[in-house]
Amino acid sequence: DVKVTQSSRYLVKRTGEKVFLECVQDMDHENMFWYRQDPGLGLRLIYFSYDVKMKEKGDIPEGYSVSREKKERFSLILESASTNQTSMYLCATRGATGELFFGEGSRLTVL
Amino acid sequence: GEDVEQSLFLSVREGDSSVINCTYTDSSSTYLYWYKQEPGAGLQLLTYIFSNMDMKQDQRLTVLLNKKDKHLSLRIADTQTGDSAIYFCAERDYSSASKIIFGSGTRLSIRP
């Protein structure tokens, strides 16, 4: 079974803090994704990566950056957290027929 | 642009069938997916269907695809309390490396 692990299930940060969300996968998938999920808005793509050190902006990249130094690890970075970044963040990898495998999610609260 | 639409809520009685509907706009969609999200968890792939299929059945789940109307449905037979979750419809254009478009999700609640 594909395993996608997000290191933090719940975080509480203050406005202006730097936040790192880590995601690790064990299936050697090339494509990895970061989404945020908000009630009534579904999932929105922040960034994705199709290879080590390669990244592309998704639909809502503003205020975020990513890092993919190793194939199994994809990090989402909030350089200066703001209250409107309070959300559920979901990491995913993509399988052979295009299906996504998701981690359990990281719920971030910015005060 | 591409869009996927679902109703936000559905309530059914335990033991009845649930039908969750989805419409999409992208005519080049080649894969369509149903995901389930239980409270506090990530999304779990339930099933998917290729655009050259009309129907797919997997135990209690039946997926119907009407390409002409761009309508996808998920039927859950004999709905149980463990089926309470949010169900997301999603579509993918095979030519795109990243574009999987999700609906906003349908929250299914089960009445005793």
Image (tube, grey):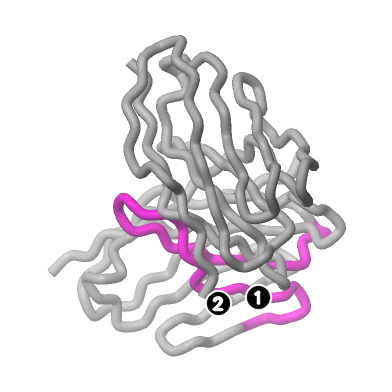
Marks 1/2: CA–CA distance: 8 Å
In the depicted view, which residue is nearer to us: A22 or A56?
A22
Q: Chain of mark 2?
A: B
Q: Chain of mark 1?
A: B
Q: Which residues are magenta?
A: B27-55
Mark 2 lies on residue:
B63
Task: Report the amino acid beneath label 2.
Answer: Val
Please report the residue visible at 64 percent of the width from the left and 47 percent of the height from the top.
A33
Does the CB distance between marks 1 and 2 fall below 8 Å? yes
Query: Based on the displayed image, in which of its 4 quarters is residue B16 positioned?
Result: bottom left
As displayed, is residue B80 above or below residue A90? Answer: below
Please report the residue visible at 78 percent of the width from the left and 78 percent of the height from the top.
B52
Q: Mark 2 or mark 1, which is nearer the start of the sequence?
A: 1
Find numbered disc 2 in the image and state the secondary structure of the residue it sits on: strand
Give the residue at the far top of this rendering.
Answer: A16
Find numbered disc 1 in the image and state the secondary structure of the residue it sits on: strand
Give the residue at the far right of this rendering.
Answer: B95
As displayed, is residue A107 above or below residue B11? Answer: above
The disc at residue B1 is none
Characterize the local packing of mark 2: few (<14), some (14-19) or many (20 or more) Cα atoms within 10 angstroms. Answer: many
Q: Is residue A15 magenta?
A: no
Mark 1 lies on residue:
B49
Task: Report the amino acid beneath label 1.
Answer: Ile
Q: Nearer the viewer, mark 1 or mark 2?
A: 1
Horizontal side of B44 relative to B56 (left or right) equals left
Horizontal side of A20 relative to B56 (left or right) equals left
Q: Main secondary structure of the magenta part?
A: strand
